[in-house]
Image (cartoon, rainbow, N blue to C red):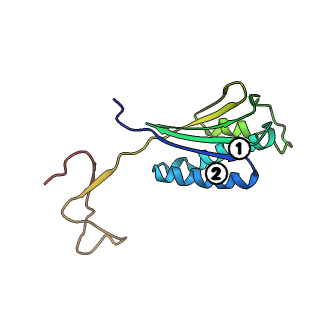
Amino acid sequence: MISEPSRHCTVELQALPSRIGQIRRIVSAQLRYWHVDALIDHASLGVTELLANVHRHAEPDKTCTVDMELLFDRLTVSVLDHDPRLPQVRPAGPFDTSGRGLAMVAAVSESWGARPFGTSGKIVWFTLPAAVPAPVVATVADHAVYGSVTTGPLDEWVTVTAVPAHSALPG
């Protein structure tokens, strides 16, 4: 039995420079909706690099599909295109202005890879760890101190205890 459902989002597009910014905004909005905001920067960078590679290298066309899946504690982002040639990481010199995209994807991700898709395409993917915190319900002892003043009618700090959302609150 699966205790936490998969969350999935797919977008088909032409990998053109004008569309890449739109996809970054879609990725950001989807990750906010899934409450994994901490992954936005790395996921946006990774998808940008993969789409830039489709734009530069994919033939016969620039049509591709971006797929994001959040399953338990792992986000997988993949880009499927119609060019069967697998990408190659090549060393970039200090003055090169391109050729670092897959190295950046590797640097920000937990893992990445590429595999053929049918006879006329490939999927390039990366994963990010996504520890989704459980909702927390705070309980407050007799008093709470608000603001930055710590002296006055309440002369001591009050301890606030976090209780997991699924446990019963004290009555």
Residue that mark 1 sits on:
51
Please state, as top left, top right, bottom left or bottom right, where the N terminus lies in the image. Answer: top left
Mark linked to residue 36: none
Answer whether labels 2 and 1 touch (C-beta < 8 Å): yes
- Residue 73 % position (x, y): 45, 37
Q: Quadrant of residue 134?
A: top left
Disc 1 residue crowd, few under 14, some 14–19, many 20+, Cα 10 Å: many
Farthest residue, direction bottom:
152
Quick check: 39 left or right of 123? left
Q: Quadrant of residue 57?
A: top right
Disc 2 residue crowd, few under 14, some 14–19, many 20+, Cα 10 Å: many
Quick check: 55 left or right of 162? right
Residue that mark 2 sits on:
23
- Residue 138 % position (x, y): 28, 55
How many circles with numbers are drawn on the protein? 2
Please state, as top left, top right, bottom left or bottom right, where the C terminus lies in the image. Answer: bottom left
Q: Secondary structure at mark 1?
A: helix
Q: Is residue 6 above or below residue 1?
A: below
- Residue 82 % position (x, y): 72, 34
Residue flagged by tag 1: what amino acid is it?
Leu
Q: Secondary structure at mark 2?
A: helix
Q: Residue at x 25, y 61 (%)?
A: 158
Quick check: 26 left or right of 161? right
Residue flagged by tag 2: what amino acid is it?
Ile
Q: Residue at x 19, y 51 (%)?
A: 169
